[in-house]
């Protein structure tokens, strides 16, 4: 096997993880030749001569075979990746934001340059989900992709739920353990999970959906009363990303969700991620693994580098075999919304309301709302208001795995009986 | 993409499943050109001209690109596969017995002929475990591979445990649903799981271990009193296959095992399989999916055919990066053994005995026994005696996944305090 010379961008949590996995790998014929970082003054664990702040030194080095991009700046990353591919170098990246926001462009660029960009590490760390979708589900029509895609929020929810830890303390822990993004709002507001979902929409359903078209509700508005409500009903709260094909339309969203204790996703704790796929032939498949952290992500990056050594490329098979499925936000979700004051939410946004509860310290409604209304945000930005998806009763066959809540499409429901109540207190 | 002409052997459960997945696949450029079966008289769902009983008609057809071997006879299968490879045709098979018993030979034959044999469908149906081991864990030292590898026994145990169904009735159901092997003793005595474990030992640890060197204890001696004992203690019984690297020796066995309700494997029910991997970088990964049945296995076979279209081959990376790890049966397992009469088991086979219980209708001992003693069978063949592995207390971090019972090696234990009791009633 020919030795691969690697040009690395970024030497933070994942970059150092890659270095360590490379060094402890068995029989991997590759070496990091140069590392580009941002801050020339920072002290490093490796000899100074390995580092540079000049990206051209790497991109223009004819001896470097592969560029590995592991920086925390999506715009700078896009520049690096673009000029690497144009310079005839294939790329491995773990930057989900950059990939999700530019995937259509990046696929074109791969076709034009003949070079590859692989990004397994960008989606659920060590879980080999993109290649599984490409290789195993390439010819199989898929019905659903869902799961826990963000290790940092899952860590926080685990600590908050199982150990009664304070939300801020749990976030601090996640950050110090290297699970959290440099900007934690990306995690706790559901953006990180949404970027991953957006990437998987391409590999699972053959469509490009820009992140801004996908609803992401986070866990940062969760209040103690919401947690108590969940506990009382025997639920946990997990941040779930979900995409589903119904009548050849695709729906997708990220939201916290009540799930029962016998739901498979309920036992996925700490920084673990899980991805569930449902296909026409295979039925459900569930993949569980560490979704974040230095070594698991480093190992995923390493397996991509290894795949480049035999010229592996994503084929984006679903583009060619599903036709252009339309993406839609016109479906109802059953949600629980807690609030301080009913004036602060607009109940006319709901299609129907099933429950309402008011008390001194905890008020909420449960009702159906269209995904597109959630996308507009409006009163959802108010931190007093918290939305959690309701557990759905549709049980899949896989053990206790339970798939939640894409109700009948809004059009169907409108034909039926719709109960829209105005609440006046 | 060039169209692939497929020559198929066998048109039973999996063969027909392959036909159906092929027909309902999106954009798969392949076609079954000819099918070789055993019984020319049997009525078939496809036109008679597609069938033959002459294997040479397929193997010697220059227009056939790929041989797919899906018969239920391991010896005949080995002949088919051997002469196909020698005739310059790559092969896909789902025959775990044939592959497990001949893997060293088959790897040589691939090297000699330059052709590939892929067998993802042979190991846990639709779970892409072999390619994941090859592609994702190729460079990562693994510590453990374990799981539920047999759909048929898992179906039986689920029905017996969760629905109080009679053992024989549950077996009949498994057979009629197509999960069971044509010869059900392969399933219930743990041979099928052992063949899969033997194959995974090659891909996970780079060693060839003949099936006859691996202990397989089945579920066919399970008595109602054993089930009651398990229920009382809050356990389920699952048939677990397990391989583990300890101090650079590899241990492996198949045995029924008591597992707690909060163990991840405990919720894997019906014909679902699960494979858990533990690696140095990724920590635990768990893969869950349908391990048997017509369509899931057909889909796995189809993805192998698809991989051949871009000349994919297993690289057997672990051969080259782990050195020759020795396989050993010299380790203690903590087991529960129930019996009718203590005269029927040889207690001197135990290294130590922790519990003994005698009553009119249920007698058992719990103690440590060396794997190699279990391999000799002796009193284990007596259907009155039933062995179940004890739950182990070592908890891994993955949710509630709990990894059982490879105790310290026998040598270490002999150095320490060994309590060997003779029971006399
Ligand atoms: N952390 C995880 O568990 C995880 C998991 C999956 C994916 N990811 C993704 O992996 C990427 C890296 O994450 P991280 O956690 O390793 O980040 P990090 O610890 O914050 O490290 C970022 C690194 O990028 C360097 N950098 C920033 N801007 C640069 C520029 N313009 N040119 C060159 N170097 C630059 C920084 O240089 P200095 O050292 O000089 O500051 C630093 O070494 C992100 O895209 C993230 O989304 C992370
Ligand atoms: N069933 C599952 O869920 C499953 C899952 C994974 C792997 N597998 C493996 O897949 C293989 C097939 O299993 P199956 O369940 O499909 O078996 P099956 O339903 O019993 O079908 C066996 C087929 O093989 C044909 N056959 C037997 N001997 C032959 C020979 N010498 N030459 C040509 N054809 C011959 C039979 O022909 P006739 O039709 O003329 O009798 C029949 O069509 C086995 O190796 C099994 O271990 C099965």
Image (cartoon, coloured by chain):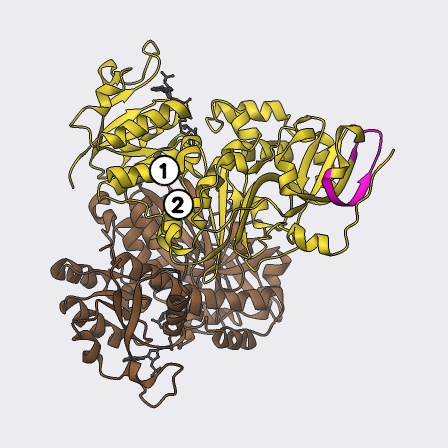
Chain colours: A yellow, B brown
Q: Is residue B292 visible?
A: no
Q: Which corner quadrant holds the N terminus of chain A?
A: top left
Q: Residue at x 39, y 74 (%)?
A: B16
Q: Which residue is mark 1?
A: A119
Q: Is residue A116 above or below residue B98?
A: above
Query: Relative to residue B302, is residue A333 drawn left or right?
Result: right
Pointer 2 and pointer 1 on the same chain: yes
Spatial CA distance of label 2 from label 1 is 8 Å
Rendered image: mark on residue A396? none
Q: Which residue is mark 2?
A: A130
The residue depicted at 79 percent of the width and 34 percent of the height is A363
Q: Which residues are magenta?
A: A349-363
Can you tell me which quadrant of the image ligand 2 is in? bottom left
Asked if the beta carbon under badge 2 is closer than 8 A to the nearest atom of ligand 1, the reply is: no
Host chain of mark 1:
A
Is residue A361 a member of the stretch shown in magenta?
Answer: yes
Q: How many marks?
A: 2
Picture coordinates of residue A51 (x, y %)? 26, 17
Asked whether A200 or A19 is in front, the reply is: A200
State the residue at coordinates (58%, 68%): B160
The residue sitting at the right extreme is: A425
Relative to A341, residue B203 above or below: below
Tag 2 secondary structure? helix
């Amino acid at each position: 096997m020919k030795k691969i010379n690697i040009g690395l961008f970024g030497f933070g949590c994942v970059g150092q993880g890659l270095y360590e996995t490379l060094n402890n790998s068995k029989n991997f014929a590759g070496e990091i030749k140069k590392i580009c970082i941002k801050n020339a003054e920072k002290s490093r664990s490796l000899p100074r001569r390995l580092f540079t702040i000049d990206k051209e030194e790497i991109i223009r080095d004819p001896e470097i075979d592969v560029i590995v991009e592991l920086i925390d700046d999506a715009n700078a990353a896009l520049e690096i990746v673009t000029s690497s591919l144009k310079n005839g170098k294939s790329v491995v990246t773990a930057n989900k934001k950059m990939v999700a926001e530019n995937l259509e462009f990046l696929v074109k660029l791969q076709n034009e340059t003949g070079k590859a960009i692989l990004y397994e590490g960008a989606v659920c760390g060590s879980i080999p989900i993109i290649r599984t979708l490409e290789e195993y589900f390439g010819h199989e029509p898929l019905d659903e992709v869902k799961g826990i895609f963000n290790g940092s929020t899952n860590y926080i929810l685990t600590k908050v739920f199982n150990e009664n830890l304070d939300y801020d303390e749990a976030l601090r822990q996640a950050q110090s353990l290297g699970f959290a993004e440099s900007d934690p709002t990306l995690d706790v507001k559901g953006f990180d999970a949404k970027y991953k979902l957006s990437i998987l929409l391409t590999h699972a359903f053959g469509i490009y959906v820009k992140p801004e078209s996908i609803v992401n509700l986070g866990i940062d508005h969760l209040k103690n009363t919401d947690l108590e409500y969940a506990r009382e009903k025997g639920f946990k709260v997990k941040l779930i990303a979900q995409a589903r094909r119904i009548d050849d339309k695709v729906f997708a969203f990220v939201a916290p969700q009540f799930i029962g204790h016998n739901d498979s996703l309920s036992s996925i704790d700490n920084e673990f991620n899980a991805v569930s796929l449902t296909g026409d032939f295979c039925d459900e498949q569930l993949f569980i693994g560490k979704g974040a952290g230095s070594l698991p992500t480093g190992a995923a990056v390493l397996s991509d580098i290894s795949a480049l050594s035999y010229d592996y490329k994503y084929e984006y098979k679903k583009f060619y075999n599903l036709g252009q499925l339309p993406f839609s936000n016109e479906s109802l979700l059953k949600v629980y919304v807690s609030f301080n004051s009913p004036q602060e939410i607009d109940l006319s946004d709901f299609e129907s309301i099933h429950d309402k509860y008011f008390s001194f310290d905890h008020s909420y409604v449960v009702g159906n709302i269209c995904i597109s209304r959630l996308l507009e945000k409006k009163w959802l930005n108010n931190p007093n208001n918290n939305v959690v998806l309701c557990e759905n009763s549709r049980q899949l066959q896989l053990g206790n795995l339970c798939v939640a809540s894409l109700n009948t499409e809004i059009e169907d429901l409108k034909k039926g009986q719709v109960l829209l109540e105005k609440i006046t207190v």
